[in-house]
Image: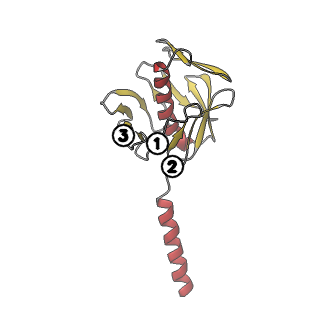
Amino acid sequence: MKILLYFSFLMFLVSCSDSKKSKFSAFDVKNNEGTTIMSMGDDGTITFPTEEDVKVTLNENYELLDDEGKVRIKLNGEGMLVTEDGENIGNVSESGEIDFGTGVTMKWSENGELMKGNEATGIMIEPNNSNSYRAASILMNLYFMASEGMESEELESSNDSILVENPQDTTVVELEED
């Protein structure tokens, strides 16, 4: 009887600890050279190897928080990414498909590569876990959006493409409608 009570208590503790686990799994997003362009930990902490001073977190409600805990961008119930000012900056489905609102959509392939239609972008998620696609897509949407506002030495953009450059790789992601 004591063993049964002990076992029941142990199972209760295990089930409680599992319910507190984050719904995120740690992942890295890498370019076609294998260089990490961003990482997310199990707790939603996001790091950018080239931007060590940037400290942001994606919480379990898909809200992007700054280092002071202020919500800057959130995914609403309809899958729209909305800024703190209420501006829609794109849509991200539960499966991680990104819709920029321009007729351009991107999604993760079965092997973890970000695809524009049937075209490979060279951007990979590692480890490849479909449970991470939505979080990774939110970050990629923000990454592409941020790349449009950066200095021209780092990134150049036009209406139909985004050129992402770093010393190890140059990745061009065409954003024109198919």
Q: Is residue 118 visible?
A: yes
Q: Mark 3 — residue?
A: 71
Left or right: where 45 falls relative to 75: right
> Which of pointers 1 and 3 lies earlier in the amino acid sequence?
1
Question: Element type at marker 2?
Answer: loop
Residue receiving disc 1: 57
- Alpha-carbon distance for marks 1 and 3? 9 Å
The kind of residue tagged 2 is Asp
- Label 3 residue SS: strand
Q: With 112 as the anchor, is 150 left or right in this view?
A: left
Q: How far apart are marks 3 and 2 (CA)?
A: 16 Å
Residue that appears at 60% across and 38% down: 28
- Nearer to us in this view, 1 or 139: 139
| Residue sticking out furthest to the front | 53
Task: Find out whether the residues at labels 3 and 2 contact each other: C-beta distance under 8 Å.
Answer: no
Residue displayed at 30% across by 30% down: 85
Question: What whole-number distance in Å separates the C-alpha atoms at marks 2 and 1?
Answer: 8 Å
Q: Which of marks 3 and 2 is nearer the N terminus?
A: 2
Do the CB atoms of the residues marked 2 and 1 lie less than 8 Å apart? yes
- Residue visible at 35% across and 27% down in the picture: 88
Sequence-wise, which precedes: disc 2 or disc 1?
2
